[in-house]
Image: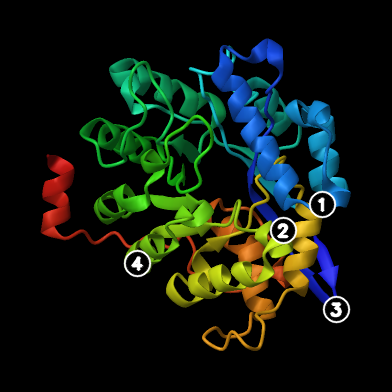
Amino acid sequence: MYSKDGEDYFIVDSHVHLWDGRKENQKNIHGQEFIDCFFDYHTNLSPDSEKWSYEEYVYYGGERLMKDLFEDGYVDHAIFQSTMLMEFYKRGFSCSDESWALTQKYPEKLTYNHSFDPRNGEAGLKQLEADAERFNLRGIKLYTAEWFGDSRGYKLSDPGCRTYLEKCLELGITNIHVHKGPTLKPLDRDAFDVADVDAVASDYLDLNFIVEHCGLPRLEDFCWIATQESNVYAGLSVVMPFIHTRPRYFAEVIGELLYWVGEDKMTFSSDYALWTPKWLIEKFVDFQIPEDLSDYAPITTAQRKKILGLNAAALYDIDVPEHLRLPTTAGVAETEVAPGAKQAVAS
């Protein structure tokens, strides 16, 4: 919990990682390129006092994660998001077993989300069933630009991916996090286009689509989709650190999101260890829209509380102390489906 000026904030960091980018886990040059790109994001958008050395950045382990999030970082609960990249890393970029072990050790503090790749076909569906049972999954993280053989990406609206989304519904996996927007070397920018979220959000109203990074640099596309789709959420990973390097740009992005998407459909995330949560939370609680950006209303304390934790807690049924709660519509399903949507799902 974070406290400032007599206000208490329940914090859910909805997008954290425990990764292994070390040389011995890299399968090819692309493994090196990917972790180097992550490190460039970290060094270019972090305050000097928060920058890590390259050696500690490529692998930091569970003990360091627990300290940065829960001892120093004010976080009450964190959610692991998987990044597999099996074409680039021998054991995958995410340390799945280590992350799951930490979740088992600290179930009150951590939730584990896994992943699927629809290009694995029937075998992947069976694996998804096994993973859902093993990890008690409530959420999935997807990388639509992930390479797979000679394929350099897929769309959520592809027939094969729809089969997996229907399996998620069957298994009770309701939170679909998807990386949309910022590209990472060597992945292709256009394979992270946000447009394919629109059709599946309309067709699967019992699923929540948390669009990580809000589609940046396609913010306008994202806003037009999210304002129409009740089940599309703005995940603020990668958006948050601009509060330091480009505060006016951050004000414009947050202002647009509050205008179009609303305070009940935005979730805080540090994208740890790209950035640590402590300084992001402190700066966001202190942040205000500049007076000369008069198109946007000032950010309220209630909005900060919802964004920093209460919305994600609602999506994942995380218990929030009664005195910290506020009403939010996050996670409220709207299950009525139009005939056109039913036809699209059936096809």
Q: CA distance from mark 3 to mark 1?
A: 19 Å
- The amino acid on which the numbered mark 3 sits, given as a three-letter code, is Gly
Q: Which residue is mark 3?
A: 6
Q: Which residue is mark 1?
A: 73
Q: CA distance from mark 4 to mark 3?
A: 37 Å
Q: Would residue 143 be found to the left or right of residue 269 on screen? A: left
First reached walking from the N terminus: tag 2 or tag 4 = 2
Res 108 → quadrant: top right
Mark 4 residue crowding within 10 angstroms, few (<14) / some (14–19) / many (20+): few
First reached walking from the N terminus: tag 2 or tag 3 = 3
In this view of the protein, which residue sits in the foreground, 64 or 51? 51
**291 shown above or below 202:** below
In this view of the protein, which residue sits in the foreground, 299 or 340? 299
Q: CA distance from mark 2 to mark 4?
A: 28 Å
Q: Which residue is mark 4?
A: 224
In this view of the protein, which residue sits in the foreground, 203 or 327? 203
- The amino acid on which the numbered mark 1 sits, given as a three-letter code, is Gly
Q: Which residue is mark 2?
A: 11
Task: Give coordinates of residue 104: x percent, y percent.
Answer: 70, 30
First reached walking from the N terminus: tag 3 or tag 1 = 3
Task: Give coordinates of residue 190: x percent, y percent.
Answer: 37, 42
